[in-house]
Amino acid sequence: MHFTRRHLDRRAPRLLVIASFVTAGAAAASCSRSDDPDMDPIDAAAPDSSNTPSDAGLDATRPTDAGFVDAAPLPVVCTSPPCAMQLVTTLGEDEDDRSEGFCTLLDDGTVACWGANGAGQLGRGDDAGTLDSANAARVVGLANVVTLDHTCAVDKEGSVWCWGTGPFLGADAGGPMTTALAPVKIDLPPASKVGLGHGTACAAIGDGVRCWGSNANGQIGPLTADAGDPAVPRPMPIPAGAPVRALSVGKATFVLREDGSLVTWGGNPPLGRVSPMFPDPNPRDIALRGILVADLAYDSACATAGGTGYCWGARVQQNVASETDRALPAPILAPEPLVQIATTRTHALEAAKVQPYRWCATGVSGDVWCWGFNESGQAGDGTRDHAFHAVKVAGLPAPAAQVKTTPNTTCALLTNGKVHCWGSNYNGQLGNGQSRGRSLIPAEVVLP
């Protein structure tokens, strides 16, 4: 583990950031029933959200003056094949479909996926259909892949390939909104990064970004103007700046640059900045700087900067009056500095109740910490008790380089190149060859 801590005036960076976001409330948590049919009825009882502590999801054990930490996620060093290098979640058929699946980029340049497959997100071809799978298997036809985002990949030639359901292009795609059971090549110049949402997608090409698909949230252009053919990538007027490090697309679009700045446009939330426009089609920087990684799940977002996690986006309680209660990044306290964080979207289950979104994060030590919804043990502490504060995931055999989470399951990519998952297995998302049930402790995914 290698990181540096800046001691000189070490309070200043954090205090300045917190002062910038005092209007953003701390995330509150509530419990509700899972879609897991093997859940005991007594476990479905939810605490009264009106009594939820205002500091739910925060942990006071971390000193508030811990200072700025300049660190990065631990690297993956393959110990034996098969070896995973990157981990992502899949997407469902639309923004209301809670996809419970994962994909990983293997060190041989292929991609393997497992879990839910109702929208073809496992990429197994027409013959395999849309059956869920508890066995990780390679996406058909992909090779020499260098990076992933959900069910899109960029290969070493810069070609973009996508599968599942989304705004896909190309002769074999069938239109701007299609379901592809096998990867289709997107009609684009060579790209370095890709970002996929349910209705919109973007790619980093040279110094710019091109987007295509739905303009319902102003992610292709102004709502008052003709956004053009949704099947034709449109250059976006992003401000000049450092090269693109990553793209994320949900209800808004995020462009994370190599200098740690984050440009956003689209739906609000999760725009992450003050704007009089709802949505805002104008790409602008948010105030938070020094961002290492950012994660976006439709209308909920998180990021890490200087060892601190920040989250914002849609409200987490139905009885909160304001839709913008969490409009700006708010710091999340944890037992150690955080270098990577993942979130899930909040989903309405019934009147006045929501299934709360969850956070999981990796620390500089390689430990994994989770907060929130835990009915299937997806917080990883060996219980099914709601995690009101950060709990350490128990039983990981090696430090984690990355963590990704869905509403009911969590997976971690370890520094030895292996993937372990815990929580619900209703869609086979544990990847251990077994169907249904759950695991309260991490189970190794059997990679192909």
Image (tube, rainbow, N blue to C red):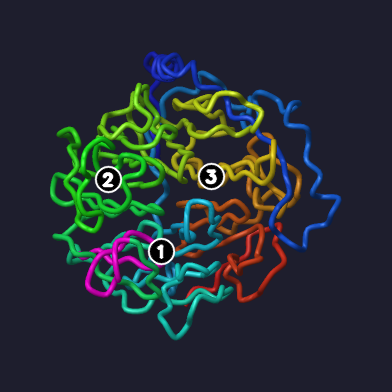
Residue at mark 2 to residue at mark 3: CA–CA distance: 23 Å
Residues drawn in magenta: 159-176
Residue 424 point in image, percent of width and height: 66, 60
Which callout, 1 or 3, points at the residue further toward the start of the chain?
A: 1
Quick check: marks 2 and 3 in contact, CB under 8 Å? no
- In depth, the one of 153 and 402 nearer the eye is 153
Q: Secondary structure at mark 1?
A: strand
- Res 395 label: none
Q: Quadrant of residue 372?
A: top right
- In depth, the one of 240 and 369 nearer the eye is 240
Q: Secondary structure at mark 2?
A: strand
Q: Amino acid at mark 2?
A: Arg
Residue 168 painted magenta: yes
Q: Amino acid at mark 3?
A: Arg
For disc 2, the neighbor class at 10 Å (few under 14, some 14 to 19, many from 20) is some
- Residue beneath disc 3: 345
Residue at mark 1 to residue at mark 2: CA–CA distance: 25 Å
Q: Single out the mark in the foreground, 1 or 2.
A: 1
Residue 438 point in image, percent of width and height: 70, 63
Q: Amino acid at mark 1?
A: Thr
Q: Quadrant of residue 163?
A: bottom left
Most distant residue in the bottom direction: 127
Residue 390 point in image, percent of width and height: 63, 37
Q: Single out the mark in the foreground, 1 or 3.
A: 1
Who's the residue at 35% across and 72% down the image?
110
For disc 1, the neighbor class at 10 Å (few under 14, some 14 to 19, many from 20) is many
